[in-house]
């Protein structure tokens, strides 16, 4: 086909030329990739993604010098009832729009080039299927995700990109219903944002919380917030249980929030192989509401945050029950560290020094300064740390 090849894999053009006979398959994979991005990075339920229409996410009108956010206005279905309490299967336009970060906007724009204006973005008549009405079914999307994974692995293998291989999931096939929980898991457990592009586009928790903090403050937290609260509580409980085990093994602890961290560790519940009933949501929120004794692991800053709202230097939103860990500031009164953290600080400092040896002097100097800071933090832990026994 007479079209330029712009895509690159590992720095190389991914095709010598585009073959007309391959386009149907590629468009199918492209739409599947767009579906995965929408499912993964909005927190929408599968049927909400399936009901998206072209034009659902217009470019925002900048107001008073602010760029504005992309918002998705579309249908939701869960708990939608008429005045008699009967479930409305057609759903309704959600009162609170979803916030779309840039990868989602890009995915929607791609789909808008595949389907006509105003059509369902996953309308079956435009996506190479026998189905002729409505949107692609969840079962069809699940098969396509499997095919897409196979295709990616084939491409990775033919180019010897073994690190790009998608391994089999021991928990079963990846399907549309798993992305929402995975997103919440990453937000709760990876403060720096391993979620795709989260760092570049603003941390997901802030983006999601924008819905409740801007204009919808009185609306109860529902939808993805519920999943996020549960995952955050589970992550915090795991952190407390892990700290308890480390202290029991004789590790030392230091930092201004040591006493609070010891209290949290002493009362840590343990969740082994969990089934989460609906009642757990209330428990999770109660757990997170214990200001000062909920522990948040911060593997990026290499510390544990015993989050107390009033002493937090990361300026959490009013009423927030979790810190803005991606903006963790040195010297905060909520910090604690263990021997493991001190060891990891020194390992990271060595890595920075090693990197600095291979970079231009101005960048190298900055990295060495950072390495020095990390070693100083580790030294100050060593000089102040005590065992849990000694602190009782
Ligand atoms: S600044 Fe303080 S409250 Fe915020 S993440 Fe860091 S330790 Fe926690």
Image (tube, grey):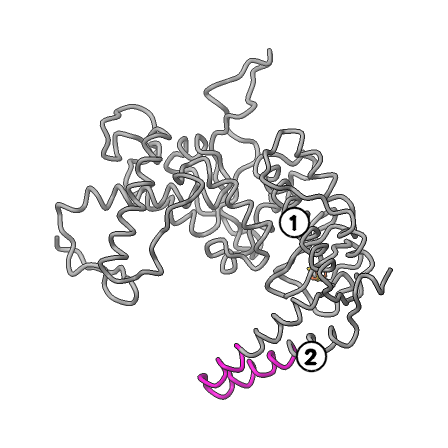
Left or right? Give the position of 277 relative to 23. Answer: right
Left or right? Give the position of 288 relative to 46. Answer: right
For marks 1 and 2, give the CA distance. 28 Å
| Quadrant of the picture in which ligand 1 is shown | bottom right
| Place of residue 182 in the rendered image (x, y in percent of width and height, measured from the top left) | 50, 44
Closer to the eye: label 1 or 2:
1
Tell me which residue sits at (39%, 39%) in the image: 173
Q: Where the C terminus falls, by quadrant?
A: bottom right
Magenta-drawn segment: 351-373
| Place of residue 269 in the rendered image (x, y in percent of width and height, measured from the top left) | 71, 43
Q: Which image quadrant is residue 221 in?
A: top right
Left or right? Give the position of 360 relative to 85. Answer: left
SS type, badge 1: helix
Residues 189 and 76: in front is 189
Q: Name the residue under label 1.
A: 238
| Place of residue 31 in the rendered image (x, y in percent of width and height, measured from the top left) | 31, 42
Task: Characterize the local packing of mark 1: few (<14), some (14-19) or many (20 or more) Cα atoms within 10 angstroms.
Answer: many
Tell me which residue sits at (49%, 48%) in the image: 61
* Sequence order check, earlier mark of 1 and 2: 1
Q: Which image quadrant is residue 387 in?
A: bottom right
Is 365 located above or below residue 17 in the figure? below
Tell me which residue sits at (58%, 39%) in the image: 273
Q: Name the residue under label 2.
A: 376
SS type, badge 2: helix
Is 233 located above or below residue 316 in the figure? above
Does the residue at mark 1 contact the one at mark 2 (Cβ under 8 Å)? Answer: no
Residues 284 and 5: in front is 284
| Place of residue 101 in the rendered image (x, y in percent of width and height, measured from the top left) | 48, 50
Main SS type for the magenta part?
helix
Taking the magenta stretch, the answer to whether it contains residue 361 is yes
Residue 48: assigned label: none
């Amino acid at each position: 086909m007479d079209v330029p090849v712009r895509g690159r894999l590992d720095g190389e053009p991914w095709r010598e030329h585009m073959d007309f006979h391959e386009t149907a398959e590629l468009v199918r994979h492209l739409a599947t990739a767009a579906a995965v991005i929408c499912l993964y990075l909005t927190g929408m339920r599968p049927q909400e993604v399936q009901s998206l229409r072209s034009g659902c996410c217009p470019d925002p009108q900048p107001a008073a010098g602010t760029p504005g956010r992309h918002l998705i206005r579309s249908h939701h279905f869960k708990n939608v009832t008429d005045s008699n309490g009967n479930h409305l299967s057609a759903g309704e336009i959600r009162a609170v729009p979803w916030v779309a970060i840039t990868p989602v906007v890009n995915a929607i724009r791609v789909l808008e080039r595949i389907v006509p204006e105003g059509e369902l973005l996953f309308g079956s008549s435009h996506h190479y299927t026998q189905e002729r009405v409505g949107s692609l079914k969840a079962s069809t999307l699940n098969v396509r995700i499997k095919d897409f994974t196979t295709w990616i692995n084939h491409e990775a293998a033919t180019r010897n990109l073994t690190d790009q291989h998608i391994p089999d999931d021991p928990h079963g096939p990846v399907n549309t219903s798993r992305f929402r929980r995975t997103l919440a898991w990453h937000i709760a457990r990876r403060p720096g944002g391993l979620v795709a592009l989260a760092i570049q586009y603003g941390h997901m928790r802030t983006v999601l919380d924008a819905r409740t903090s801007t204009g919808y403050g009185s609306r109860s937290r529902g939808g993805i917030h519920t999943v996020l609260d549960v995952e955050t509580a589970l992550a915090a409980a795991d952190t407390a249980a892990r700290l308890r085990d480390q202290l029991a093994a004789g590790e030392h602890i230091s930092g201004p929030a040591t006493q609070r961290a010891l209290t949290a560790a002493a009362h840590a519940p343990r969740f082994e192989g969990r089934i989460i009933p609906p009642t757990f949501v209330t428990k999770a929120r109660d757990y997170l509401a214990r200001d000062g004794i909920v522990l948040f692991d911060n593997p990026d800053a290499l510390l544990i945050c015993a989050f107390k709202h009033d002493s937090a230097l990361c300026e959490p939103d009013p009423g927030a029950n979790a810190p803005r860990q991606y903006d963790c500031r040195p010297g905060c009164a909520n910090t604690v560290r263990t021997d493991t953290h001190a060891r990891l600080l020194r390992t990271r400092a060595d890595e920075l020094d090693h990197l600095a040896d291979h970079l231009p002097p101005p960048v190298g100097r900055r990295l060495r300064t950072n390495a020095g800071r990390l070693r100083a933090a580790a030294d100050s832990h060593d000089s102040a740390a005590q065992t849990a026994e000694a602190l009782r």
